[in-house]
């Protein structure tokens, strides 16, 4: 099988208020949470990631990257299988499974690219979070659908401008005392979608 670069994007939205709260509560750092990837579901790129393939790679990524604070991602996708430190904008600091959703916590870094990412979020720009990996695909019975094969290797999660996968929203995290505030109708809808 011939491995190629596989890129899959999820929407990643945060309110200005939540951004400001996260920055205030985390000593100037912006920390966001949400769905990083979804198993067993066709995305808009026509790919299905089997759960066992994603589980294997996320376990490896947690052990080799996240636990060592090396789970860096870039602002925009390069055409490379290597994370370029000049473009590093964020670091994945935690990942876990909830059903078929891979959830994660991401810290936006104070690097040039991270500062751009933070300002884009503060300006209300809709971004996507995207997995980048190497692997091969095989056609499935459903037209225009391919299945990612067990040779898949997860490289990084990048922030990009072209969301292509359904229904994942990230939100800022306040590591200090969680303050309960009334949700707006939109926040309520987003939170109910995130809870499944």
Image (cartoon, grey):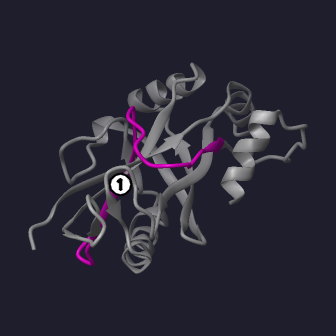
What crowding class fits label 1: few (fewer than 14 Cα within 10 Å), some (14-19), or many (20 or more)? many
> Could you tell me residue 97's position as x and y percent?
58, 70
Residue 151 in the image: above or below residue 13? below
Judge from the rendering whether residue 98 lies leftward or rightward of residue 183; answer left or right: left
Q: Quadrant of the C terminus?
A: bottom right
Pick whichever, 33 or 94, lies toward us: 33
Q: Give the number of marks.
A: 1
Where residue 52 sits, quadrant-wise, is bottom left
Residue 136 in the image: above or below residue 115? below
> Could you tell me residue 185's position as x and y percent?
81, 35
Q: Does the magenta stretch include residue 115?
A: no
Secondary structure state at the residue bearing disc 1: strand
Residue positioned 43% across, 70% down in the render = 58
Magenta highlight range: 148-171
Residue positioned 42% across, 56% down in the render = 71
Where residue 42 sits, quadrant-wise, is bottom left
Residue positioned 74% across, 43% down in the render = 189
Pick whichever, 73 or 28, lies toward us: 73
Q: Name the residue beneath numbered marker 1.
A: 156
């Amino acid at each position: 099988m011939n491995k190629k670069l596989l890129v899959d994007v999820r929407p990643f939205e945060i309110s200005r208020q939540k951004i400001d709260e996260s920055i205030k509560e985390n000593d100037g750092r912006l920390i966001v949470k949400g769905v990083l990837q979804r198993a067993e579901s066709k995305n808009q790129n026509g790919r299905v990631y089997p759960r066992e393939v994603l589980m294997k790679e996320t376990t490896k990524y947690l052990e080799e990257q996240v636990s060592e604070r090396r789970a860096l991602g870039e602002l925009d996708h390069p055409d490379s299988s290597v994370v370029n430190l000049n473009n590093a904008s964020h670091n994945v600091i935690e990942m876990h499974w909830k059903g078929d959703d891979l959830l994660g916590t991401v810290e936006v870094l104070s690097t040039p690219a991270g500062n751009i990412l933070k300002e884009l979020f503060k300006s209300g720009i809709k971004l996507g979070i995207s997995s980048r990996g190497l692997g091969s695909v095989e056609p499935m019975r459903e037209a225009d659908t391919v299945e990612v094969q067990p040779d898949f290797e997860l490289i990084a999660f990048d922030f990009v401008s072209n969301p292509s996968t359904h229904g994942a929203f990230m939100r800022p995290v306040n590591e200090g005392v969680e303050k309960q505030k009334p949700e707006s109708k939109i926040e309520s809808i987003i939170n109910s979608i995130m809870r499944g």
